[in-house]
Image (cartoon, rainbow, N blue to C red):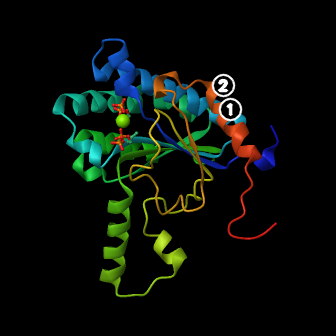
Amino acid sequence: MHNAKLPAHVGLIMDGNGRWAKKRLMPRSFGHNAGMNRMIALAEHAQKLGIKYLTVYTLSTENLSRPREELDGLYSLFRKYFTENVKRLYANKAAVRVIGDLSALPEDIEKLLRDGESNSPESASFTLIFAINYGSRTEILRAVNAAAESGVKLDEDGFRRLLYTDGIPDPDFIIRTGGEVRLSNFLTFQAAYAELYFSDVLFPDFSDDEFDGAIEEYSRRERRFGKIR
Ligand code: IPE
Ligand code: IPE
Ligand code: MG
């Protein structure tokens, strides 16, 4: 694969865990567990390909209204990931970053996620960004209110510095699994010029090969950014 055509930043909307579990007559949490395992392997694969940033949509602001039981299952997965699996990521010289409103999560989770960021290796060549209790509308409103409070008019760069994604380049490519063709409040400001890719495959079945196929399609896209060629 030619490097110039590799996206630097990939956004991944990991959808379809619930349906994957339902097909197996298992509870939704079984699907989330399988999805988490798939994500861990995919992140390592993406790093090997030479992708610099992978943002995984893990929990949306809207998902917070799901049943307590399902949320508790997800929190248990975060606890496990940020105490055990994250070490392997660090060992591979990869950093963790978290975007979203963590204050609404259980306190121990908020601390674990923040520690996950601060314990990251300093010279990382790959960053895995977890979007947790993330929503673009909340992110944008938060930035607008901060700007209004400061009383200073902002240009685009100034506004970007107030977003959760401060310092992270815009996603070049957004992949959504699970068959729905929408962004569901994911990086809507940052994705203004992202290439979009939708797969019917339910996330736990989204293999490294499926990912490679998506990247290959990206490499054939012509990004014009409004210009003519
Ligand atoms: C995506 O899978 C993961 C989260 C939203 C936490 P879903 O849980 O939305 O799975 P489906 O869409 O119901 O199959
Ligand atoms: C989007 O999936 C959120 C995540 C994958 C974390 P949803 O399943 O919540 O999206 P909708 O409700 O189908 O739009
Ligand atoms: Mg879904």
Q: Quadrant of residue 145?
A: bottom left
Q: Nearer the viewer, residue 52 or 58?
A: 58
| Left or right, residue 164 beside residue 104 | right
Vertical side of 173 occupied by 82: above or below: above
Circle 1 packing at 10 Å, graded few (<14), some (14-19), many (20+), is few
Quadrant of the image where one finds ligand 1: top left
Q: Residue at x 64, y 30 (%)?
A: 45
- List the residue tagged with mark 2: 209
Amino acid at pointer 1: Gly
Q: Secondary structure at mark 2?
A: helix
| Left or right, residue 30 beside residue 160 | left
Q: Quadrant of residue 79?
A: top left
| Left or right, residue 33 beside residue 211 | left
Q: Nearer the viewer, residue 96 or 28?
A: 28
- List the residue tagged with mark 1: 213
Vertical side of 132 occupied by 149: above or below: below
Q: Residue at x 47, y 32 (%)?
A: 86
User: How many numbered marks have been drawn onto this rendered protein structure?
Assistant: 2
